[in-house]
Image (cartoon, rainbow, N blue to C red):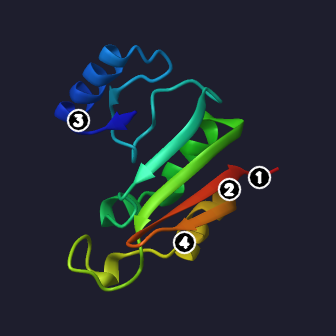
Amino acid sequence: ALDTLEPSISRLCEIVRQDGVTNLVGQICDITAPIPLAAHSVDLILLSTVLHIKAVQDHAKEMFSEFRGILRTDGTLAVLECQKAEANFGPPLHLRLSAEDVAELAAPCGFVRSSVTSFEHTYLACFTPGP
């Protein structure tokens, strides 16, 4: 698990330790910069409500390329974002991304959308590394 916020990573590591989870590691890291993980060492990448952030979008090509490098060939990139609809929470409508918008960001780095699951206010789009 990667986050720029130390308290988030500390709390996650505490929960992981208490629950005896052995296959999850927390690390303070900026996902818009090179990620200090070995090539093809990650089974799942979950981006949770971060792609609508302009600073993240500005680095989308480099970020998705980095994800492609660390993700196993049979791994999954999962993106959770708010539905592109008006709501009284979350980012304003003009900053929200549809599942199609996310697919357009990921495709140049070889990601292929494998599924989209819609929820009341959010959706989860899953991608696999293409050939």
Q: Where is 27 relative to 116, above or below?
A: above
Q: Secondary structure at mark 4?
A: helix
91 above or below 109?
A: below
Kind of residue at badge 3: Ser
Residue at 82% of width from left, 50% of height from top?
131
Whether residue 123 can be seen here: yes
Q: Earlier in the sequence, mark 4 or mark 3?
A: 3
| Mark 2, other Cα within 10 Å: few <14 / some 14–19 / many ≥20 | many
> Left or right: 108 with respect to 79?
right
Q: Position of residue 130 (x, y in %)?
A: 77, 52
Using the image as rendered, state which of residue 33 and residue 124 is in the foreground.
Answer: 124
Q: Earlier in the sequence, mark 1 or mark 3?
A: 3
Cα distance in 3D space between marks 4 and 3:
26 Å
Q: Secondary structure at mark 3?
A: helix
Q: Which residue is mark 2?
A: 111
Mark closer to the chain start, 2 or 4 = 4
* Residue 87, numbered label: none
Q: At which x and y percent is residue 112?
A: 71, 59
Residue underneath mark 3: 8
> In the image, is 56 to the left or to the right of 111?
left
**Mark 2 residue type:** Phe
Q: Secondary structure at mark 2?
A: strand
Q: Are marks 2 and 1 in contact (CB under 8 Å)?
A: yes
